[in-house]
């Protein structure tokens, strides 16, 4: 149980285009989903926290207009990188926490998306 | 707010031996949760073990166990009978057990397993 999928796993795009990454909780309903960015050989950096049906809360320094987050249902959150530039190239990871039992306090992670902007 | 510190950037262990990864934390909360996550080369974050602060008993999951010292704010991970598949980055993390349950991560420890 507690499986989170992420799609696509890898994407290459041209500078100036937008890219959408999907995060789905497959076998549980997710109260909250989180989006992280991870640079090589570093820890995870929280970008934003989203709750179903409400606006995401962004961490300091993260541009809301560049990284659009939508959490339309209890099993799906999307991250759209708008007008992507080479400096946005990174590994993006989502996580989800459940609604009850032990899942409420635990984040389960997706496999990540490697974004390369040319 | 929590802080999580992993002071060992890299560790190595002989296959079948035991290794302990260190983690210290600081928090003003009375209710909190601590976790160890494993990130192998695939970069998939995998939950290894979790500990509720209110529980005195140390959590155990098969070959993985923790030594939770609440007064010392220490949360070390012991891996017994190390296997080649245990080679990965290990992240210690915690949250306050309330609100949005945002995790604070340590910088990670890279574990190598020597055949």
Image (tube, coloured by chain):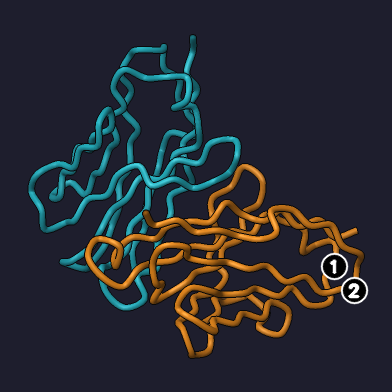
Chain colours: A orange, B cyan
The answer to whether A89 appears left or right of A67 in the picture is right
Q: Residue at x 84, y 57 (%)?
A: A12
x and y, in percent, of residue A76 in the image: 54, 74
Q: Residue at x 90, y 73 (%)?
A: A16
x and y, in percent, of residue B16 in the image: 35, 12
Give the residue furthest to the bottom: A54
Could you tell me which secondary element the residue under label 1 belongs to? Answer: loop
Marks 1 and 2 sit apart, C-alpha to C-alpha, by: 6 Å
Q: Which residue is mark 2?
A: A16
Q: Earlier in the sequence, mark 1 or mark 2?
A: 2
Name the quadrant of the C terminus of chain A: bottom right
Q: Which quadrant holds residue A79?
A: bottom right
x and y, in percent, of residue B4 in the image: 37, 53
The answer to whether A76 appears left or right of A85 in the picture is left
Q: Chain of mark 1?
A: A
Q: Which residue is mark 1?
A: A85
Give the residue furthest to the front: A27
Residue B69, placed above or below residue B79 = below
Q: Residue at x 45, y 78 (%)?
A: A74
Mark 1–mark 2 CB contact (< 8 Å): yes
Q: Chain of mark 2?
A: A
The answer to whether A45 appears left or right of B90 in the picture is right
């Amino acid at each position: 149980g507690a499986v989170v999928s992420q799609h696509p796993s890898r994407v290459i795009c041209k500078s100036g285009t937008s890219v959408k990454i999907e995060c789905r909780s497959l076998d549980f309903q997710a109260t909250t989903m989180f989006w992280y960015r991870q640079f090589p050989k570093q820890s995870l950096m929280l970008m934003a926290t989203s709750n179903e049906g409400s606006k995401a809360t962004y961490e300091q320094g993260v541009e809301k207009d560049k990284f659009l987050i939508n959490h339309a249902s209890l099993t799906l959150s999307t991250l759209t990188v708008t007008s992507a530039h080479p400096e946005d190239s990174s590994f993006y990871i989502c996580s989800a926490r459940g609604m009850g039992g032990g899942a409420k306090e635990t984040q389960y992670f997706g496999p990540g998306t490697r974004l390369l902007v040319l | 707010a929590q802080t999580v510190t992993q002071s060992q950037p890299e560790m190595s262990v002989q296959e079948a031996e035991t290794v302990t990864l260190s983690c210290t934390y600081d928090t003003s909360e009375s209710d909190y949760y601590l976790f160890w996550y494993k990130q192998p080369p695939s970069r998939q974050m995998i939950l290894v073990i979790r500990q509720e602060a209110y529980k005195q008993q140390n959590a155990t999951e098969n070959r993985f166990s923790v030594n939770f010292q609440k007064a010392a704010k220490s949360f070390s991970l012991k891996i017994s009978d190390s296997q080649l598949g245990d080679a990965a980055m290990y992240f210690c993390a915690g949250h306050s057990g309330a609100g949005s349950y945002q995790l604070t991560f340590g910088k990670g420890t890279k574990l190598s397993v020597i055949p």
